[in-house]
């Protein structure tokens, strides 16, 4: 099969690498891709992930058999719908199902309607009303932009004044454009966070290995939120008991709720959980593979990802035997100086071969190849993943390999997984 993957980050590199291992895949393309993805797929850099007509045209021109739409934006824009209408098989939720991520208000209303455990919340379309509500609340409190915001649209405000400032920036300052025109203000849940990525075909939902992401930029969960500074899997917090409760109280009820609303969700459902004293509760849903969770979860997959994606699209997931390695994986993100704020690109990267020689996989997130040298081209530049028989082994291996890589301004968190070791 000739397969096209949409996207150009570390998550897409992980997906492309896993697909390249499938005997079913004879040729692999990626649009736009990046310098690392080019090692396993033919990249088409002039086609943007958000240009749905160009993606359909590319799929037709290249006569691809299957398209995997990975990022949130093209899913929300109806990329899967457009491909399927053109007669091209595609993996990922359609635009209606992608609302699970594209609108936090949509998914929150769904949870409240069907009794799925989550934080109490209020929706606001008017800044004055939101500010008046905040005056009656206590901190910490969570403010969320309704729409997609590159993983930066959620703020856990430590004071009411901070929450007021966030509302002003989103609703009046246009910080996230239309995505912040409506906001969700919700209670702050306390506990540990775990991510459960699930294959879902509209009839069956199958969880992958649970993972833990590290969102804040600095050690000890300090500093602003990022797209994610590292992840590991499986999560030791996600015990058999928690897994059973999550399946019975959240995963299956979510599937039933979507079906009751006439939504057939086919793709990857990302379920962000808070393990509270009362049990697991939903922090948020995403409608795709997480980043960098995917770089820790997919290396543990033993089964053929291409086979799974075809089964999801054809609603045959219940007949799949999905197997996982009995190991742990850790991914350390190397970021540009200044990220998640302003940063410079074009910094020469060295040590990639040394890191790989240690047995690690280096996923490229924001890189370019210039005059034969890899250079930085994004905030999150690389994800260094290592496997181990234990979480401690995986973390140690990932850090040992990450230390071999250098570029000007590079920084990484030094405590990925340390709280659980």
Image (tube, rainbow, N blue to C red):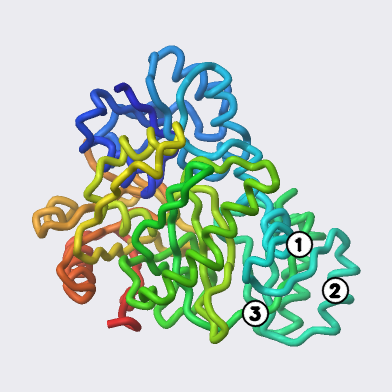
Marks 2, 3: nearer the viewer:
3
Q: Earlier in the sequence, mark 1 or mark 2?
A: 2
State which quarter of the image contains the N terminus: top left
Q: Are discs 1 and 2 less than 8 Å apart at CB?
A: no
Q: Residue 131 carries which label?
A: 2
- Give me the C-alpha separation between circle 1 and circle 3: 15 Å
Answer with mark 2 or mark 3, whichever residue precedes in sequence.
2
> Mark 3 sits on what residue?
188
Q: Residue 334's quadrant in the figure?
A: bottom left
| Percent of width and height locating residue 393 | 16, 72
Does residue 42 appear left or right of residue 98 in this picture? left
Q: Do the residues labelled 1 and 3 touch (CB within 8 Å)?
A: no
Q: In which quarter of the image is the C terminus?
A: bottom left
Question: Label 1, on which residue?
Answer: 183
Instruction: Look at 32% across and 67% down and name the residue there.
Output: 232
Q: Is mark 1 on a helix, strand or loop?
A: strand
Q: In this view, does 395 lie to the left or right of 85?
A: left
């Amino acid at each position: 099969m000739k397969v096209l993957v949409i996207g150009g980050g570390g998550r897409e590199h992980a997906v492309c690498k896993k697909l390249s291992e499938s005997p079913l895949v004879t040729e692999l393309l990626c649009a736009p891709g990046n310098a690392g993805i080019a090692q396993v797929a033919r990249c088409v850099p002039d086609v943007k992930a958000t240009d749905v007509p160009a993606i359909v045209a590319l799929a037709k021109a290249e006569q691809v058999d299957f398209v995997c739409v990975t990022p949130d934006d093209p899913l929300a824009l109806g990329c899967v719908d457009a491909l399927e209408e053109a007669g091209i098989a595609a993996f990922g939720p359609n635009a209606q199902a992608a609302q699970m991520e594209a609108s936090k208000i949509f998914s929150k209303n769904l949870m409240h309607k069907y009794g799925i455990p989550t934080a109490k919340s209020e929706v606001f379309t008017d800044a004055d009303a939101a500010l008046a509500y905040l005056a009656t609340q206590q901190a910490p409190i969570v403010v969320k932009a309704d729409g997609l915001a590159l993983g930066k649209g959620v703020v856990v405000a430590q004071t009411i004044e901070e929450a007021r400032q966030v509302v002003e920036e989103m609703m009046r300052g246009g910080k996230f454009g239309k995505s912040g025109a409506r906001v969700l203000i919700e209670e702050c849940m306390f506990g540990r966070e775990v991510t459960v990525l699930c294959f879902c075909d509209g009839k069956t939902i199958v969880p992958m290995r649970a993972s833990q992401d590290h969102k804040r930029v600095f050690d000890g969960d300090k500093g602003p939120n990022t797209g994610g500074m590292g992840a590991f899997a499986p999560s030791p917090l996600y015990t058999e008991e928690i897994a059973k409760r999550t399946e019975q109280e959240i995963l299956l009820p979510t599937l039933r709720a979507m079906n009751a609303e006439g939504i057939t969700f086919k793709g990857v459902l990302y379920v962000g959980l808070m393990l509270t004293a009362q049990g697991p509760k939903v922090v948020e849903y995403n409608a795709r593979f997480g980043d960098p969770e995917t770089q820790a979860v997919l290396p543990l997959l033993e089964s053929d990802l291409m086979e799974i994606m075809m089964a999801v699209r054809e609603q045959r997931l219940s007949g799949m035997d999905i197997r996982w390695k009995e190991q742990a994986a850790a991914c350390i993100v190397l970021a540009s100086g200044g990220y998640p704020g302003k940063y410079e690109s074009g910094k020469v990267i060295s040590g990639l071969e040394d890191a790989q020689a240690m047995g690690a996989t280096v996923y490229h997130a924001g890189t370019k190849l210039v005059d034969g040298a890899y250079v930085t081209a994004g905030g999150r530049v690389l994800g260094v993943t290592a496997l181990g028989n234990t979480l401690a082994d995986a973390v140690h291996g990932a850090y040992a390999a990450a230390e071999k890589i250098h570029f000007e301004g590079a920084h990484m968190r030094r405590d990925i997984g340390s709280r659980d070791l």
